[in-house]
Amino acid sequence: MNNSSQFKKNDLTNQVFGKLIALEILTEKKNGCYYWMCKCECGNIKKVLSTRLVQGVTKSCGCLKYIKGQNKTHGLRNHPLYSIWKGMKYRCYNEKCKNYKDYGGRDIKMCDEWYNSMENFYNDMVIGYIKGEVELDRINVNGNYCKENCRWVTQTQNANNKRNNKYISMNGIVRTAAEWGRLLGIKDNTITNRLKRGLSVEKSLSRIGIKNI
């Protein structure tokens, strides 16, 4: 059997194994079997031996056993959500954090379920999380970190939800300074500084070469 027919027979591309989907075969081998690069439903990427996929030995990046509570400890230190969880605690409870004044300093806290258990945070928020594509956002920026007040949003959406964002209205259109800046090719701090100096919205949003905004 030639190599091409052998690969076709063992092609796992786009096949689903538990929570994993096989993306592409790697050149790396072990005991004559190839490794496959797989993506887990939780967003993690994992390298898995083909035999472990086909035989059902490996069904996730490792998150499945935590969801089922098979480990006495959460064992999630290597999962991206762990650093997000630690970051919440740091902002809310450590006065040495440079952003403490905007969180713990304003009495923003974590709910008891999340504060006391990384597993609870993981189980509540793993659905919808995509590593590198979304950030944790509080729906009510003055509210606490809890399941009811948190969601995953893109970086742009998260920036637009900051409590200190200044919304600027012109010609019936309302945008943040950052959004106007990206649209017009002006730095957002240039816009806000112009407004602070008392310039009109029209002058604050103008630049050479733009006549009609």
Image (cartoon, helix red, strand yellow):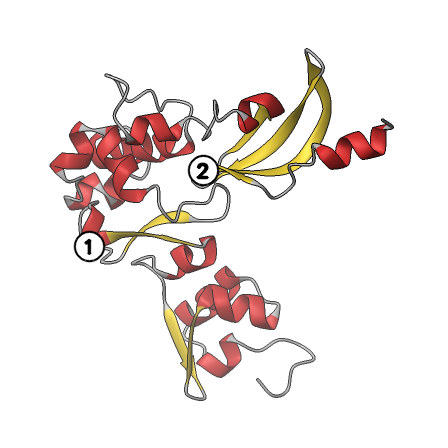
Q: Which residue occupies the extreme front position in the image?
A: 1
Q: Going by the image, does 134 lie left or right of 15?
A: left
Q: Which residue occupies the extreme top position in the image?
A: 31
Residues 113 and 144: in front is: 113
Q: Tell me the amino acid under the disc marked 1.
A: Asn
**Residue 91 percent coordinates (x, y):** 27, 36
What mark, if any, has residue 19 been given in the picture?
2
Which image quadrant for residue 162?
Answer: bottom left
Q: Which residue occupies the extreme right position in the image?
A: 2
Lower position in the chain sequence, tag 1 or tag 2: 2
Q: Tell me the amino acid under the disc marked 2.
A: Lys
Which image quadrant for residue 77?
Answer: top left
Secondary structure state at the residue bearing disc 2: loop
Q: CA distance from mark 1 to mark 2?
A: 36 Å
Residue at 14 percent across and 43 percent down: it is 107
Q: Going by the image, does 187 lie left or right of 9?
A: left
Quarter of the image for the C terminus: give it.
Answer: bottom right
Q: Going by the image, does 146 lie left or right of 132?
A: left
Residue at 52 percent across and 80 percent down: it is 203
Residues 76 and 24: in front is: 24
For the image, the number of numbered tags is 2
What mark, if any, has residue 142 been given in the picture?
1
**Residue 205 percent coordinates (x, y):** 52, 76
Residue at 57 percent across and 25 percent down: it is 48
In this rendering, the answer to whether 174 lies above or below 42 is below
Q: Residues within 10 Å of mark 2 (few under 14, many from 20)?
A: some
**Residue 173 percent coordinates (x, y):** 43, 83
Numbered disc in front, either 1 or 2: 2
Residues 183 and 115: in front is: 115
Which image quadrant for residue 41?
Answer: top left
Secondary structure state at the residue bearing disc 1: loop
